[in-house]
């Protein structure tokens, strides 16, 4: 009477174990695929940012990606501009990179969160510079470490933390000095391009 029931128990156990093994296999496969995708994205991002990185500047970060199909001479010129140059002042320091200058400029008027800074940088540069979120937040962390910016306040929007940044007095002074230097350099360049105008 109980013989069919006793025979069925091992069969159910075997089926259950097979299903468990299949489920675990699918879970492991999904985890491996996700890890591979994340690793691939990280490698692609590093390769994209590597050409524009400054060698040792504490304020140098890559600007937006150059568009595809850029001629080689333009690319070489662009990379030369991105490489840090020394200039003399009260203290010898490295020239600020364009991306850093634009980030500080975006924070000059008011405190902003990450997305606001991204949008403002694009607007200031008239769409020429588009920073990636990862590049921006790396730059913000380094600017905070250099005490050029600080956290103004935080708020929660749709269960997500939104952090606002502002310039420190040191950051305002650094931005003002850099803007004055750029303005002076531009004035010299324009005067040399138009000698008659520079003589007046």
Image (cartoon, rainbow, N blue to C red):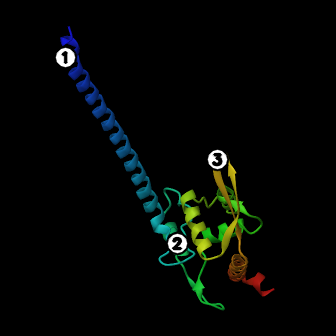
Tell me residue 181's x, y (percent): 69, 82
Residue ranking furthest to the top: 1
Who is closer to the viewer here, 200 or 1? 1
Is the C-beta separation of discs 1 and 3 under 8 Å? no
Residue 180, picture quadrant = bottom right
Would residue 193 be visible to someone looking at this image?
no
Residue at 25% over, 25% down: 13
Q: Cα distance, mark 2 to mark 1?
A: 80 Å
Would residue 157 be visible to someone looking at this image?
yes
Mark 2 lies on a secondary structure that is helix
Q: Cα distance, mark 3 to mark 2?
A: 45 Å
Who is closer to the viewer here, 26 or 62? 26
Who is closer to the viewer here, 69 or 94? 94
* On screen, residue 187 above or below 71: below
* On screen, residue 44 above or below 25: below
Residue 47, picture quadrant = bottom left
Tell me residue 133's x, y (percent): 57, 57
Tell me residue 24's x, y (percent): 32, 37
Disc 1 crowd rating (10 Å Cα; few below 14, some 14-19, many 20+) is: few
* Of marks 3 and 2, the one in the foreground: 3
User: Which residue is denoted by mark 1 in the rendering?
Assistant: 7
Disc 3 crowd rating (10 Å Cα; few below 14, some 14-19, many 20+) is: few
User: Which residue is denoted by mark 3 in the rendering?
Assistant: 159
Is the C-beta separation of discs 2 and 1 under 8 Å? no
Residue ranking furthest to the bottom: 90
User: Which residue is denoted by mark 2 in the rendering?
Assistant: 77
Residue at 55% over, 77% down: 58
Sequence-wise, the earlier of marks 2 and 1 is 1
């Amino acid at each position: 009477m109980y013989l069919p029931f006793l025979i069925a128990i091992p069969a159910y156990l075997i089926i259950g174990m097979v299903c468990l093994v299949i489920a675990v296999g699918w879970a492991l496969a999904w985890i491996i695929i996700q890890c591979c995708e994340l690793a691939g994205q990280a490698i692609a991002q590093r390769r994209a940012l590597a050409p524009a990185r400054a060698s040792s500047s504490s304020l140098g970060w890559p600007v937006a990606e150059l568009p595809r199909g850029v001629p080689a001479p333009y690319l070489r010129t662009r990379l030369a501009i991105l490489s840090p140059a020394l200039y003399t002042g009260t203290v010898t320091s490295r020239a600020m990179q364009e991306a850093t200058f634009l980030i500080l400029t975006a924070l000059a008027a008011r405190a902003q969160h990450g997305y606001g800074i991204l949008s403002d940088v694009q607007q200031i540069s008239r769409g020429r510079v588009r920073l990636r979120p990862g590049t921006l937040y790396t730059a913000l962390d380094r600017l905070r470490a250099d005490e050029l910016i600080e956290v103004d306040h935080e708020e929660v929007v749709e269960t997500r933390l939104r952090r606002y940044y502002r310039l420190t007095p040191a950051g305002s002074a650094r931005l003002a000095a850099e803007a004055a230097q750029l303005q002076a350099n531009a004035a010299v360049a324009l005067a040399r391009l138009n000698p008659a105008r520079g003589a007046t």
